Image (tube, rainbow, N blue to C red):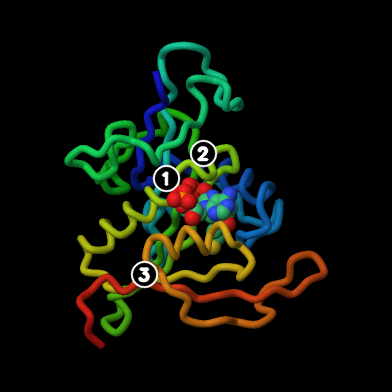
Amino acid sequence: MRNQITLRQAGPQDAEALIALMKQLDDETDYLLYESGERPADVKEWRRILSGDTGDLNRTFFVAEIRQGTQGTHDTQGTHDPNGPHDLRGRQETHDPLGPQVTYDSKDRQETRAPQGPLAGYLEVRTMDWKKVQHRAYFVIGIQKEWGGKGLGSLFLEYLERWARERNIRRIWLTVIADNHKAVKLYEKAGYVTEGKHPRSMKLGEHFVDELTMGKWLGAQEK
Ligand SMILES: CC(C)(COP(=O)(O)OP(=O)(O)OC[C@H]1O[C@@H](n2cnc3c(N)ncnc32)[C@H](O)[C@@H]1OP(=O)(O)O)[C@@H](O)C(=O)NCCC(=O)NCCS
């Protein structure tokens, strides 16, 4: 049996698992803001953030939770394992666009239960309630290397878009290091366009690198 993947909003119960995921991501990739060990990892603080107590900036986290299959072995480290990461792109479509192996769980953060398995990735979306900017959302995404290239990034963006439309958010945007081609391709494929370039905006090791702003307009074609 294959793993079941649930995309859902994270709640305070997910603090420990999310910290572990973020630590792993910061060890694995240079393309997120934090270098290895820099990211705040206080459980109490993360419980507060995940319960929605974040002041003027609303921070919402979605997570991909892996529920391991019940047949065969349970070693998710190896791709030879029938329960290991599999390609989600060929999934059969049902009336739910996320398909049968992937569940879209629309419960909000207060209703979520503790994780039923490891987290393969997360997406954080930031919004503000001020009238002039409440139509826009900024996001960051990170997926474990082991689960990369299998369609999870695209699923997260579908989830985000659905979540945003339900809240009448019209513009979704992000920043990305210009040479993070994988991520740029993912966003372009999902309909995001490059809006600007910030020269030497970040420093990777000894090298300054450019960042791009990319965005997607969800509303009708109007100003
Ligand atoms: C970038 C990232 C989010 C992509 O997620 P993903 O789950 O691998 O993406 P998907 O499998 O849904 O692939 C979507 C598209 O991205 C592109 N892509 C994915 N893997 C790729 C690779 N190895 N090389 C080139 N393009 C790739 C492809 O266009 C792909 O579409 P296709 O499969 O139809 O060709 C993920 O690799 C990641 O979290 N990386 C580390 C952190 C990071 O860079 N975050 C972004 C910060 S802005």
Please give the label number shown on residue 63: 1
Q: Earlier in the sequence, mark 1 or mark 2?
A: 2
**Residue 187, image quadrant:** bottom left
Q: Which residue is mark 3?
A: 172
In depth, the one of 163 and 39 nearer the eye is 163
Question: Residue 147: x, y in percent?
Answer: 53, 39
Q: Which residue is mark 2?
A: 17
Q: Amino acid at mark 3?
A: Ile
Where disc 1 sits, the SS reads strand
- Using the numbered discs, state the Cα–Cα distance from disc 1 to disc 3 in whole angstroms: 18 Å
Q: Amino acid at mark 2?
A: Ala
Disc 1 and disc 2 in contact, CB within 8 angstroms? yes
Asked if the beta carbon under badge 1 is closer than 8 A to the nearest atom of ligand 1, the reply is no
Q: Earlier in the sequence, mark 1 or mark 3?
A: 1
Q: Earlier in the sequence, mark 2 or mark 3?
A: 2
- Using the numbered discs, state the Cα–Cα distance from disc 1 to disc 2 in whole angstroms: 10 Å
Question: Residue 207: x, y in percent?
Answer: 78, 71
Disc 2 and disc 3 in contact, CB within 8 angstroms? no
Return the residue found at the far right.
206
Q: Is residue 178 left or right of residue 122?
A: right
Q: Quadrant of the C terminus?
A: bottom left
Return the residue found at the far top.
72
Question: Residue 108: x, y in percent?
Answer: 27, 48
User: Residue visible at 52% across and 26% down?
Assistant: 84
Q: Is residue 103 left or right of residue 31?
A: left
Question: Residue 128: x, y in percent?
Answer: 35, 73
Where disc 2 sits, the SS reads helix
Please give the label number shown on residue 101: none
**Nearer the camera: disc 1 or disc 2:** 1
